[in-house]
Amino acid sequence: MPFDDFSAPPAARVRVVIHYCNLCRWMLRAAWLAQELLSSFPDELDEVSLHPGDGGVFAVWLGDELVWERQRDGGFPEAKVLKQRIRDRVNPERELGHSDR
């Protein structure tokens, strides 16, 4: 859908939020994962945002669903695993090529 009104940002329908600890210097990891998700799901995701926090947080939300949480899931997500979790929710029939092997 083309966006011709530049007076306001488009409304996000499918939104991912990566909440990361700024004090731990995890912004580059969060930005890299955001790039991976946007590259892998150009038609499925409308937005991936980075949300700085503290306290060792590293969590990935798809809408209101917590897809990954560092303490709960045992560390940081591999890109492959995170892509599979996002795919399973936004387009389960989609193949991810080498990420599915």
Image (cartoon, rainbow, N blue to C red):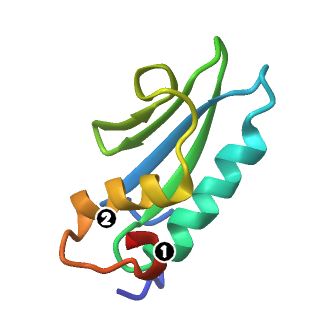
Residue 6 visible within the image: no
Residue found at x 65% / y 45%: 30
Identify the image quadrant of the N terminus: bottom left
Front residue of this view, candidates 93 and 25: 93
| Residue bearing mark 2 | 87
Nearest to the observer: residue 72 or residue 67: 72
Q: Residue at x 42, y 82 (%)?
A: 97
The amino acid type found where label 1 is placed reads Ser
Locate residue 18, reporting x and y percent: 53, 41
The outermost residue toward the front is 101
Report which residue position mark 1 lands on: 40
Q: Looking at numbered disc 2 in the image, what kind of residue is underneath it?
A: Arg
Q: Would you place residue 24 above or below residue 99 in this image?
A: above
Classify residue 55 by image quadrant. Answer: top right
Give coordinates of residue 22: x percent, y percent.
75, 26
Residue depicted at 74% across the width and 40% down the height: 27
> At numbered mark 1, what does the secondary structure look like: helix, strand or loop?
helix
User: Looking at the image, which is closer to me, 1 or 6?
Assistant: 1
Residue furthest to the left in view is: 93
Location of residue 15 by image quarter = bottom left
Q: Quadrant of the C terminus?
A: bottom left
Residue drawn at (44%, 52%) of the image = 82
Image location of residue 96, percent across then percent down: 39, 77
The answer to whether mark 1 and mark 2 are in CB contact below 8 A is: yes
Name the secondary structure under disc 2.
helix
